[in-house]
Amino acid sequence: MTVTHRTAAPSIRATARRTGRRLALTLALGTAAVAAAPLLPAGPLAPVAAAQNIQNIQRIAAVVNDDVISLRDILARMDFVIATSNLPDSQEVRQRLLPQVLQGLIIETLKMQEAKRLGIQVNQGELTEGIRQVESQNRMPPGSFLPSLQNRGIPAATFERQIRAEISWIKVVRSSLSGQVTVSDTEVQARAEQLRQSVGKPEGLLAQIYLPVDDPLREGEVRQVAERLAAQIRGGANFVALAQQFSQDPTAAKGGDMGWVPLGNLEPELREMVERTENNRLTDPVRTAAGYTIMLVRDKRIAGDRAAAVGTTMSLVQVSLPTTGARTMAPEQRAALSQRATATTSCDAMEALAREVGTPGSSRIEGLSPNDLPPALAAAIDDLPLETPSRVVPVPGAEVIVMVCERSERSALDDEEIRRQIENEKLEVLAERRLRDLRRNALIDVRL
């Protein structure tokens, strides 16, 4: 495989180095400034103070090339992180979050700028599907996440911006980098043999938060962020939510979930730390060649027969009948629609009913695994025959009726599955390099 790697011209590299120093310094100063003055005032404001506060939150916090990040953007993202990660809403927490949140917004901006440069857009259907996937990963009823944010006073646009940036970046990677990836039959056979050889050896059910060190000048800053995240998680913060917000690895989209990983495949530093960490415990931040990793060791086992291991994916149709929120249905309306849904005899009929109902989450959904569903819903369809409506299943905020349209199972040693995994791994490496280049070549001016 030939990988092209764009090298910046000397003048650009020099600018990037200066920008990196300025960014690290200004972040430190910005954090100190937050300690001196609250980001959000407490209590009612007099008219003059209120006007000053509005002016403050509208001021520019950072400029990334030609795009602006405002203090309002940072505050909104802080509110979102605190609301979804079980962090206490205190001035100390906000002070510690500031560098992490600003870094995340800068990365998002770079991703969207690259998508714009390539003429890539995200349509409403893709955005809706991205939100649905986040709901599935967090075991939330479809259509419930945005209303839950709005009920807490958090604009939906805050979360939608993050989802739009990630979808844009996926499309950038697929359109501009996938052509650089090839996987030979020899590689597939070698990976299959490696999986066979792992039988009888230890593996871990792991999740991670990965923070790259893409500039030696940021070593101390990144280490501090990793230590703060670890402390926040041990203090009760939600690992999945923080991984989704701050991890710079493709697993971030799944809350850092890596699945079962042979311990022999880990870097030596990580393997040693995982081996001496008890189940359901967090490792300390580990410095590897590329950055810092925090690992959640969920479980350990001795690997069994990979040829017998299968993964199930499903295509299903769901009708969701809200019981809370702005679109709450009266009990008699839910009963009537439930009766119609449980009387359907085909996926086409169920899909037509879902379109008629039109509530968030009422649609056909592809590529789900049982682990993507809330436990009650997964149990309800476990042995459900195809094109047969489920019973009415209560989930938080709704009652749902589901029909499974297709099921497929695949061995872990299936050649196509292995080829797809290797392709994804190579794409992840190229994507990380592209993002590192974008950051190094960007003009980033932090004004906090």
Image (cartoon, rainbow, N blue to C red):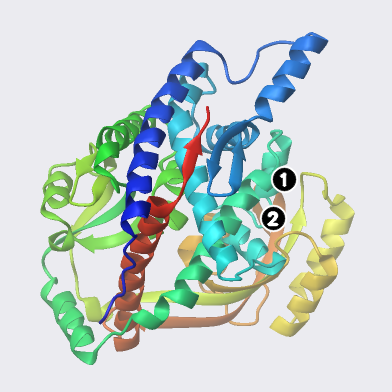
Q: Is residue 101 visible?
A: yes
Residue bearing the label numbered 2: 143
Please give left or right for residue 363 compared with residue 106 in the image.
Answer: right
Residue 300, position in %: x, y? 21, 54
Q: Position of residue 69 (x, y in %)?
A: 59, 40
Label 1 vs label 2: CA separation? Answer: 8 Å
Image position of 121 (left or right of 30): right
Query: Which amino acid type corresponds to the residue marked 2 in the rendered image?
Result: Gly
Residue at 17% over, 49% down: 270
Task: Report which residue position mark 1 lands on.
Answer: 147
Furthest-front residue in this view? 11
- Residue in the picture at 55% in, 58% down: 113
Mark 1: which secondary structure? helix
Q: Secondary structure at mark 2?
A: loop
Residue 448 position (above or below residue 434):
above
Residue at position x 71%, y 65% in the image: 124
Q: Nearer the viewer, residue 215 or 339?
A: 215
Residues packed near mark 1 inside 10 Å, few (<14), some (14 to 19) or many (20 plus): some
Q: Quadrant of residue 142?
A: bottom right
Furthest residue to the top?
A: 46
Q: Quadrant of residue 201?
A: bottom left
Residue 168 in the image: state x and y as whole percent: 56, 64
Q: Is residue 179 left or right of residue 296?
A: right
Q: Amino acid at mark 1?
A: Pro
| Mark 1 and mark 2 residues within 8 Å of each other at the beta carbon | yes
Residue 135 visible in the snapshot:
no
